[in-house]
Image (cartoon, helix red, strand yellow):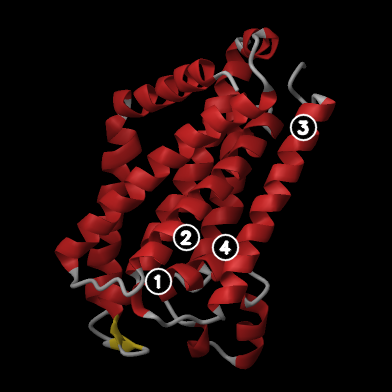
């Protein structure tokens, strides 16, 4: 593996994040703070506890997951779409760099930025509510696994998209609604029977539930199922990316 080439692309992606720190870091942190003001104060005054956890603390894993999913997708999709847009992707494809090295560099950069953001939001949440993390190793594992998985998903979107509008289509119209409806701000046990059943078909539910378990030891679904669903989605993304590079889908036109 050409580690020097991987490091060069990775360093370029990280440098881009620090050049746009207001958009990459400050904006999501401010949005998270507003969620705490609106949901934590307004709704939290009416819902004191869920499963023995204060409402303000209960929504922390969901808020982190919301930012993690959207930022992972946005970072990775823009990173590979922009070279397509300006035409520099042809130089990348003709360079002595393997497809695996390209994926590691771009996805690694996007995932790293998302993980850093997730940890910053976690620290910000600690300013608003008292937090406990019962399983810190599992918390980091879910954080890394989710960031890598959805960075791969964002990489796929960046290759598929033909315009900046399409680049934002999936995160805004699919991922964000699924996150809100995936138990980020409530327990699915609070839903009527039929809607609880429908929610079980939402894949984001298993990510949020598993991540919340790492904090409080409580979850809407089994931790084993949550971890298994995350791994399955990761493998599906890997298979799609492998197919894209094998066929050259939307890479050369």
| Contact between labelled residues 1 and 2, with CB atoms less than 8 Å apart | yes
What mark, if any, has residue 178 been given in the picture? 4
Report which quarter residue 136 is drawn in. bottom left
Between marks 4 and 2 in the image, the one whose residue lies nearer the viewer = 2
Q: CA distance from mark 2 to mark 1?
A: 8 Å
- Whole-percent x and y of residue 164? 58, 29
Label 1 neighbourhood size at 10 Å, few (<14), some (14-19), many (20+)? Answer: many
- Callout 1: SS: helix
Q: CA distance from mark 1 to mark 4?
A: 21 Å
| Contact between labelled residues 3 and 4, with CB atoms less than 8 Å apart | no
Using the image as rendered, state which of residue 176 and residue 135 is in the foreground. Answer: 135
Q: Earlier in the sequence, mark 4 or mark 3?
A: 4
Q: CA distance from mark 3 to mark 1?
A: 34 Å
- Callout 3: SS: helix
Residue under pointer 2: 142
Between marks 4 and 3 in the image, the one whose residue lies nearer the viewer = 3
Q: CA distance from mark 2 to mark 3?
A: 26 Å
Between marks 3 and 1 in the image, the one whose residue lies nearer the viewer = 1
Using the image as rendered, state which of residue 91 and residue 173 is in the foreground. Answer: 91
Between marks 1 and 4 in the image, the one whose residue lies nearer the viewer = 1
The correct choice, above or below, for 37 with respect to 22 in the image is below
Residue under pointer 3: 244
Q: Is residue 153 left or right of residue 216?
A: right
């Amino acid at each position: 593996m050409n580690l020097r080439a991987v490091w060069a692309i990775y360093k370029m992606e990280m440098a881009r994040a620090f050049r746009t720190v207001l958009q990459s870091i400050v904006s999501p942190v401010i949005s998270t703070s507003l969620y705490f003001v609106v949901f934590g104060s307004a709704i939290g005054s009416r819902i004191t506890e869920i499963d023995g956890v204060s409402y303000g603390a209960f929504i922390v894993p969901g808020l982190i997951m919301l930012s993690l999913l959207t930022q992972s997708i946005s970072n990775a999709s823009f990173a590979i779409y922009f070279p397509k847009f300006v035409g520099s992707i042809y130089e990348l494809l003709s360079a002595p760099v393997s497809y695996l090295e390209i994926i590691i560099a771009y996805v690694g950069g996007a995932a790293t930025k998302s993980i850093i953001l997730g940890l910053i939001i976690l620290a910000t949440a600690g300013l608003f509510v008292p937090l406990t993390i019962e399983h810190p190793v599992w918390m980091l594992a879910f954080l890394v696994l989710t960031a890598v998985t959805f960075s791969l998903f964002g990489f796929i979107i960046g290759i598929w998209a033909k315009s900046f509008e399409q680049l934002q289509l999936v995160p805004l119209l699919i991922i964000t609604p699924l996150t809100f409806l995936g138990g980020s701000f409530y327990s699915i046990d609070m839903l009527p029977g039929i809607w609880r059943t429908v929610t079980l078909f939402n894949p984001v539910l298993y990510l949020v539930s598993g991540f919340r378990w790492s904090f409080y030891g409580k979850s809407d679904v089994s931790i084993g199922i949550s971890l298994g669903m995350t791994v399955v989605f990761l493998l599906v993304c890997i298979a799609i990316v492998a197919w894209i590079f094998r066929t050259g889908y939307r890479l050369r036109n």
